Image (tube, rainbow, N blue to C red):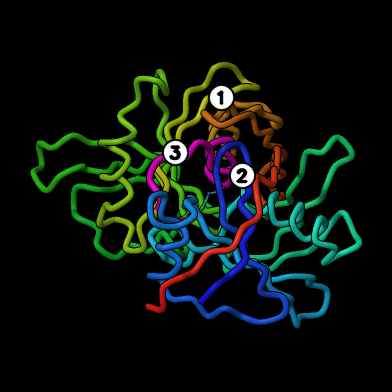
Amino acid sequence: MRIRFTKMQGAGNDFVVLDETRALLQLTPAQYRFLADRHFGVGADQVLSVRLSPAPGIDFEYVIHNADGGEVEQCGNGARCFVRYVSDKHLTDRDRVRVKTLGGVIEPRLNPDGRVTVDMGAPVFEAGQIPFDRAGLSPHEAGTWEKWTLALGADPASPKVAVALVSMGNPHAVQEVPSVDDAPVHTVGPQVENHPRFPRRVNAGFMEVVNRALIKLRVWERGAGETLACGTGACAAVVAGIRLGRLESRVDVQTRGGMLTIEWNGVGEPVLMTGPAVTVFEGEIEVPDQ
Ligand SMILES: N[C@H](CCC[C@H](N)C(=O)O)C(=O)O
C-alpha cells in the first residue's frame, strides 16, 4: 500500500503524520513499526493519525502509536504538531482546535510567535487511578503518588528508586537526579518502563531541578526509548515538582531537543504546555502488507 505522510518534529521528538480525514488507513501494529523504523521506514518516535470527529464540540480525533506499534493515550509534542498540520493543510480555519485522544480532550492553539500552546487537561495522581492500577505489586514496594519505591530486581537487596507517579492521560514515573547528563537513563529507564508495577508499562522521567523556574529533563519513553523531548513527560515532571513545593507555577523545561514551557496552577487545574512544532518534509512510501 502506498501512503503519503508528513514528517514533523516538536523539540526533536519526531513524528510521521498521516491524514485519515477522508479514509482510515487501518494499519497494523507491524505497519506502524515499519513507518517508525529509522532504517527500513521513514523513522519516528511516534506515528500520529489525524481523523475527523463525529462528536459535537470536538473538531478532530488524534490517534497515537509508539515506534513499537502500540497505541497510547497521549502525546504532548505531537499535539503541537497536530494543530500546525491541520492549519497548514487547511483542515481547519481556526488557530485553536479541540482534539479527542484516548487520554482525554486537549486544546492546542497556534500562537502569533509561531510557537504552540496546548491545554493538556488536568493531571491525575496515582491513587489506584488507571493506568496506575495495583496489579502486580510485590510486598516490598509501597508508597504514595509522590514517593513510590520501585525495586529494580526480584532480590530484596536489588537497587531501589523513588518515583513520582503522574498521569497526563498516559502514565509517567518521574525521579529527581542531581544531573541529567549523568543519569542512568538507558539502564534504569527500561527497568522502570517494564517494571511489573505498571502492567501497561510507563514513561520514565529523569528530572534535574536547576532552580524554581527551570528544570532539565530526559525521558526514557514507553515504546520508543529515549527521545530528545517528551511533552507529557515535561508536564508530569513539572506538576510533580510544583506539588512537592520545589517549583513555581511556570517552569521552563530544557530537553535535549529544545525548550518547553509548562504552566500549572494546582490540583484540578489544566496543564498548559508551550513549545515548537515544525514540518520537516512530505513524502510517500510503499508500506508492506502485513
Ligand atoms: N511514549 C508515550 C507517548 C508519547 C509521549 C511523548 N512523545 C510526548 O510528547 O508526550 C507513551 O507511551 O505514553
- Tag of residue 215: 1
Q: Position of residue 40 (x, y in %)?
A: 39, 56
Kindly identify the amino acid type of the residue bearing the numbered disc 3. Val
Question: In the rendered structure, which segment of residues is drawn in magenta?
Answer: 224-238
Q: Is residue 233 magenta?
A: yes
Q: Secondary structure at mark 2?
A: strand
Q: Residues within 10 Å of mark 1 (few under 14, many from 20)?
A: many
In the image, residue 175 above or below residue 290: above
Of badges 1 and 3, nearer the viewer stands 3
In-image side of 53 versus 127 (left or right): right
Rounded to the nearest angstrom, the CA distance separating label 1 from label 3 is 13 Å
Residue in front for this viewpoint, 2 or 46: 2
Residue in front for this viewpoint, 107 or 90: 90
Q: Is residue 182 magenta?
A: no
In the image, residue 153 above or below residue 93: above
- Tag of residue 219: 3
Kindly identify the amino acid type of the residue bearing the numbered disc 1. Ile
